[in-house]
Amino acid sequence: MSTPDVPTRGPARPGPYIAAGILLAISILVPLFVPAYSIDQPRLAGMPFFYWYQMLWVPITAAMVGVSYRLVTKEDRRRREVARGARTREEEQ
Amino acid sequence: MSGLAVPLATTGDRPVNGVALTVVVVLFILVAVLGFFAARWRAGKETGLHSLDEWGLGGRGFGTWVTWFLLGGDLYPAYTFVAVPAAMWATGAVSGFFAVPYTIVLYPIVFLLMSRLWSVSHRHGFVTPADFVGGRYGSRALTVAVALTGIVATMPYIALQLVGIKAVLTVLGLGSAENVLLTDLPLIIAFVVLAAYTYTSGLRAPALIAVVKDLLIYLAVIVAVIYLPIKFGGWDNIFGAAQTKLDAVSPATGKPAGVFIPGAASYSAYWTLALGSAMALFMYPHSVTGVLATKSRNTIRKNAAVLPLYSLMLGFLALLGYAAISAGTKPIDLNGAVNPQLVVPQLFLDNFPSWFAGIALAAIAIGALVPAAIMSIAAANLFTRNIYRDLIRPDADPRQEAKVSKIASLVVKFGALIFVIAMDQSAAINMQLLGGIWILQTFPAIVAGLYTRWFHRWALFAGWVAGIIYGTVAAYNVVNPVTKANFGGSIAAVPGTNVQVYIAVVAFAINLIVAAVLSLVFRAMKLPDGKDITRNSDYGADEDDPKVAQLQREYPLGETGGPAF
């Protein structure tokens, strides 16, 4: 049972993937680096740094994932159009 | 049994809060009606709910909004709302606040992995993670290993949702130290209703109910986070009280009661707990169910950018554990012992008008029903696809699959109910702790498979065995310093060192090393590799890609796996 491997997407351009990869790597590694934030001062509205700094990373990560989403889906759409174009040409021949 | 006629009269030490109880009951009935109504919501026109795609995955058509609510209810279950603040209240940051970095690093990981799983599953009609492993590696042993791990890890998770409901019921005064059956009666009623609407409506029920639950929970948390600090003299005071409590040296152990801000010795425990939990979460069948129910490849990625709003809420909720310290909340259970799990329900009941406390308590109770439904559906799908169909009835048609899955969902739920009623609560917590360690051992098979076929199927199987054994033994050897009981926690030293880390992460490393080394060995021995029915192009397929439906017609799923052993 072998199926023809019909490409769903054209070849990738590395740029958007590298950029998204860097953003995602930052948002995984930085919040896990505990020595950077296991301190009490400076406090924000009475909250120790340890607590508000980690909460602050929630929206930061969300924003970086959001940017990655834009980058990757845009490239995804382009690759899909390339694949679709190639298929239509094949069918016409 | 004579007390059955007048249940409220026999309650022991706790008075029944009539107003709060009424609010909870009314909201519960509303939600139950919604659950049954969900069967008609976006129902499949021709087939009704008679296939796993319809019953077990809600028609595979949830868009960004529904997915946001569904996954919010799925990934942040009621037990989290009860357990995280409880951990903060009892022992502070390392066992409680790690939930924040955990739910931060979760989303980049989801972003990277889950759309590939979505694409290949969409193309081949996979319903469970074990379906994918079967299609990728053609190994029945590995498929069953992944499926069993998923089922076993999910069961105590469902049981813990019941523990969450139980905490709410106890605080409301529905419970009696003398009559165990009576104490559990409201829980049993709630669960029968849950089982009934999950049976009729499938995944659509929790998806619809999740919307109501989220509105309630956001309302409760936002009001509490603004009002309580004002009431208790600002965050300064709250953190001051927490620091005093956690730094106090416990006479039983000679160590501080908890951790306010982790010192250098707990860094590794803190980050490995966060990372290990984040990696494990999307290996749980109920998370995968949520992902596969989405409409298109990138729905889950978009959600990875908006779901962190729940993490923010969880962070504030965790801090309510500290607010309870400063408020002097006394979480006394029916037997007179301190039960940290009651902290948040008690905090709401003590500090808010009854009707508002009722809303908050209802949010927690309903918040338990949503994930319990999804988890039982996910476990039932695993049983149906990877045990019933793969091992017992390979020619099962979609209608039979849906039927088996519906019944399995009932069995799973009642199993969890018996778990909670018959056994000690700590049994559920211990099993859940083990479940987290075990489920991470399916990571190499599932995730590596999304990117490469380099690993040999038997090497992955051996790695899974090694990881499970190490994880179980290491968890058993952790002794609670106060009670001297085994399974006292999820942190242990890396073998041969003093570095304290999350056991699951070490087990995962062992798993990966075994899988990699044996892959080389088995390749050199030319041990037969399984049949891979997936194609490179499958991993990038989207909803409207050609060949999806055609592929399913030409290559029905019954052939998944090929020759097995």
Image (cartoon, coloured by chain):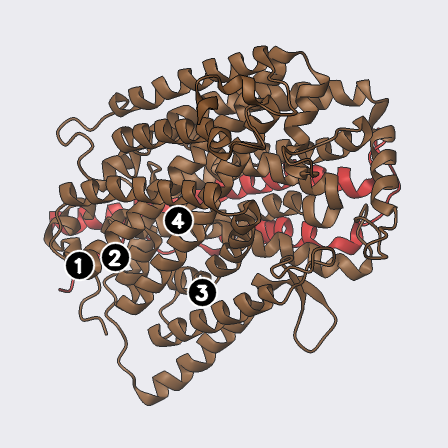
Assess disc 1: are there few (<14), some (14-19) or many (≥20) residues with their C-alpha within 10 Å of its C-alpha: few
Residue at mark 4: B285
Q: CA distance from mark 3 to mark 4?
A: 15 Å
Sequence-earlier tag: 2 or 1: 2
Horizontal side of B171 relative to B437 (left or right) equals right
Chain letter belonging to callout 1: B
Horizontal side of B503 relative to B529 (left or right) equals right
- Circles 3 and 4 in contact, beta carbons < 8 Å: no
Q: CA distance from mark 4 to mark 2?
A: 15 Å
In this view, the residue in front, B160 or B236, is B160
In the image, residue B503 above or below residue B94: below
In the image, residue A64 above or below residue B365: below
Tell me if I can see residue B73 in this picture.
yes
Q: CA distance from mark 3 to mark 1?
A: 27 Å
Q: Position of residue A16 (x, y in %)?
A: 50, 49
Assess disc 3: are there few (<14), some (14-19) or many (≥20) residues with their C-alpha within 10 Å of its C-alpha: many
Closer to the eye: label 3 or 4: 4
Q: CA distance from mark 3 to mark 2?
A: 21 Å
Sequence-earlier tag: 3 or 2: 2
- Secondary structure of the residue carrying tag 2 is helix
Q: Spot the brown chain and give its letter.
A: B
Closer to the eye: label 3 or 2: 2
Residue at mark 3: B444
Q: Spot the red chain and give its letter.
A: A
- Circles 4 and 1 in contact, beta carbons < 8 Å: no
Q: Residue furthest bottom?
A: B525
Residue at mark 2: B387
Q: Position of residue B283 (x, y in %)?
A: 44, 53
Sequence-earlier tag: 3 or 4: 4
Q: Position of residue B148 (x, y in %)?
A: 36, 58
